[in-house]
Structure formats: C-alpha cells, structure tokens
C-alpha cells in the first residue's frame, strides 16, 4: 500500500517507537501511584517525555507540558478551561471540528459570543479581520497553525502580537505542524499550544497534550485521582497534575518519547524539507492535469505537506475508493472535519481528496500517485 493519509495519522512509525511501546507494556506500572520499580519507571518515562516535548516545542517549563489522549482532548480542556459565560472568542474559518464544536457548545449552552475570521477561496485569512473583530469582552483567540485541508498556515506570531496588545489569550492548534516543521511556542507567542502525538510527531495514537505558558490558568475539564493530595476535595492546583486526572497512557507516552528522539536525531528541518519536496513533486505533477482542481495557495514559502484536490465533478469518496481499490493508494476524502473551510472553497457538496505526505514516503510513490490521478481524470 502507498500510504498518503498522514495528515490523519502516520501509519509508518520509526522502529524505535514500536520497540518502546512493546518494552513499556512489559515493564511500566502506574505513574505517580507508588514506589514499586514499575511505578517509578513509569514516572521517569513520563517525566523524560515532558522534558523532550518541552524542548521540541519551546515550552519553557516541562511541568507545563500536560499529556492528553489527543489534540481534541487538549483543545477541549484549553477552551472549556479558559472561556466562560459573557466571554467573546475569535476563531477562523480554517478550523477543525475539534475547535468548532467546543465553541458551538459554549455558544449554545453558556451564551459565549463567537466571531470567525473568514477565509477566501484560496484559504487565506486577513489579519486585519482579527483586529476588527476584537470586542471589550474578547477573552480568547483560538486558531490552527496549519489547515488540515489545504496545508495553508496562519502566521501565529502576527496573531499573537494582535492578541497581546489587548490582553487576549491565544490558543494554538498545532495538530498539523508539531513534528513536521519547527514549532516554538515562545516565538509563535502561543499561550496554550495543543498537539497530537500520532501525526507529524510519529508517535502512537492515544497520545497528545498541551504546552502552557507560565501564568496561564486553565480550569480542569475533568477531576479525579492524581496520586497526590488524596484527602483534598478539590483537584490539585499545580501543573501538570491539575489537568491530568486519572491514569496516564504511559505505554503510549513511552512511544511518543522515542518518536521525539527520532525527530531530533533526524532533524526537524530535514524532515520538513523532505516532506515538502515530496508535496511539491506531487503538486507540480497533478496541477496541470485536465479536469483536476487543486485547493489552497502553493506560492506560500511555508506550508505543510498536503495537497487537496478534486477530479472533475466526481464525488471525492468515489475517487478515494478508486485510488484504494485499483491502485492501493490510501487518501482521505470528504469534509475532513473542516466544514467552514469547505464552504469557503466551494466544496461543501463534493468534499475533496486529500493527499498528505510523511518522512517515510518515497519519490516512486509520489510518481505512482500522479499516474493514478492522471488515469482517473482521463
């Protein structure tokens, strides 16, 4: 199989990730739940992973790296823990439902006010619109670093400068960029940076988290066992414990830790260069094919390794099925959990076929995918 659905999850993992998970299954107890050798080893494994993630993503304090089961959970914690009745939130048309649905629920249930920076037909947003939408009660701006549909990126540093002038928190969704391109939450100006482990970070599913700037207070979404302050009626107030109720996925975190080792040894700039070279090769191969429409702006100097397209007026699901059945190429069709961006692109009914590339893809696979698109468009 030629696997080109890496924006959904990276199927091919570094061998050391698989080995780390297997070893952890044999040896790790419950982190922060005792002094047995298994429990202590789990605690050390989790702590080492926090340090590695903090260094990779530019979080100044390792204890402000909080682990969750994915970026969806991280975003739910971040949004629900900082936005309250009477607040106003600014987001964008580029967002995934992991951002949109928590916001819509707060709007319906708590009267939170929402505004969205519109996207144009190329997936661009205007930074002037962020400023224009600010109100006296604007509490948070939440937006992704890169679109999971087009690969187009938002200049978070520019958004952060706008937010800081008004004392507004910036929650960044780095699901599509962490591990794929250099990400430093300090340089980007993110107050809360949410990430997932199973995409560009090349780790196991069921891993993810958030990096939190010093001084940012997040109300816990869930409370329960932590292994400390057991007689207190309230969740411990210190990070990371305040947001990590229940048993952590130490086995998955061990794999994520090994994945970060691989990324750092390989070089994130090296990974980014290869993935974007493969993306450009595919884009240049399909963009001139008659009947193919490619979405997004490919003139940008920085973007993620995604190409979304349609072939004539064919249903995107039918095209993706044909790619799978006839050519053994895995892609993602449909709406990609990005409904507002599909409306902006004019693809609400048809959806789009997304090709997304990883370190483990090859030029030969790209050329085969180009040939498949050409044949299906004939």
Image (cartoon, rainbow, N blue to C red):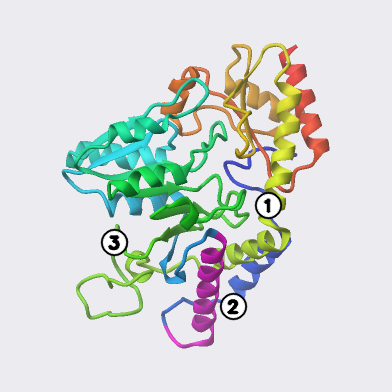
Label 1 with label 3: CB-CB less than 8 Å: no
| Magenta stretch: includes residue 49 | yes
Report which quarter residue 116 is drawn in.
Answer: top left
| Magenta stretch: includes residue 92 | no
Residue bearing the label numbered 3: 217
* Pair 3/2: label in front: 3
Residue range of the region highlighted in magenta in the rendering: 34-56
Prevailing SS of the magenta stretch? helix
Q: Which mark is residue 341?
A: none
Q: How packed is label 3: few (under 14 Cα within 10 Å), some, or many (20 or more)?
A: some
Q: Position of residue 147 (x, y in %)?
A: 51, 36
Give the Cα separation between the discs numbered 3 and 2.
Answer: 35 Å
Residue bearing the label numbered 2: 27
**Disc 3 secondary structure class:** loop
The residue located at (39%, 26%) in the rendering is: 118
* Furthest-right residue in this view: 364
Q: Which is nearer the eye, 185 or 151? A: 185
Q: How packed is label 1: few (under 14 Cα within 10 Å), some, or many (20 or more)?
A: some
Give the Cα separation between the discs numbered 1 and 3.
Answer: 33 Å
């Amino acid at each position: 199989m030629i696997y080109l659905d890496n924006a959904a999850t990276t199927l091919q993992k570094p061998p050391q990730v698989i080995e780390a998970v297997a070893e952890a299954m044999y040896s790790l107890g419950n982190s922060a739940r005792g002094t047995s050798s298994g429990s202590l080893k789990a605690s050390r494994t989790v702590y080492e992973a926090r340090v590695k993630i903090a260094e990779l993503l530019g979080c100044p304090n390792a204890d402000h790296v909080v682990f969750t089961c994915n970026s969806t959970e991280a975003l739910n914690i971040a949004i629900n823990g900082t936005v309250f009745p009477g607040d106003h939130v600014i987001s964008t048309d580029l967002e995934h439902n992991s951002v949109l649905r928590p916001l819509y629920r707060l709007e319906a249930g708590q009267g939170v006010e929402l505004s969205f920076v519109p996207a144009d037909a190329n997936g661009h947003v205007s930074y002037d619109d962020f400023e224009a939408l600010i109100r006296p009660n604007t509490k948070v701006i939440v937006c992704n670093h890169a679109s999971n549909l087009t690969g187009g990126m938002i200049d978070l540093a520019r958004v952060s400068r706008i937010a800081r002038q008004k004392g507004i928190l910036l929650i960044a969704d780095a699901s599509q960029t962490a591990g794929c391109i250099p990400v430093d939450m300090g340089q980007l100006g993110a107050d809360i940076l949410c990430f997932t482990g199973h995409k560009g970070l090349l780790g196991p599913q069921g891993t993810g988290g958030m990096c939190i700037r010093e001084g940012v207070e997040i109300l816990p979404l869930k409370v329960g066992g932590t292994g400390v302050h057991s007689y207190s009626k309230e969740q411990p107030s210190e990070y990371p414990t305040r947001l990590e109720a229940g048993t952590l996925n130490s086995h998955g975190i061990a794999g994520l830790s090994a994945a970060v080792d691989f990324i750092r040894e390989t070089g994130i700039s090296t990974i980014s260069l290869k993935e974007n070279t493969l993306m450009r090769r595919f884009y240049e191969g399909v963009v001139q094919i008659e009947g193919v429409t490619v979405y997004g702006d490919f003139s940008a100097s920085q973007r993620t390794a995604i190409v979304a397209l349609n072939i004539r007026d064919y249903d995107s699901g039918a095209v993706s099925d044909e790619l799978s059945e006839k050519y053994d190429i895995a892609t993602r069709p449909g709406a990609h959990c990005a409904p507002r961006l599909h409306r902006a692109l004019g693809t609400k009914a048809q959806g789009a076929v997304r090709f997304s590339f990883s370190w483990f893809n090859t030029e030969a696979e790209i050329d085969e995918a180009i040939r498949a698109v050409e044949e299906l468009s004939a």
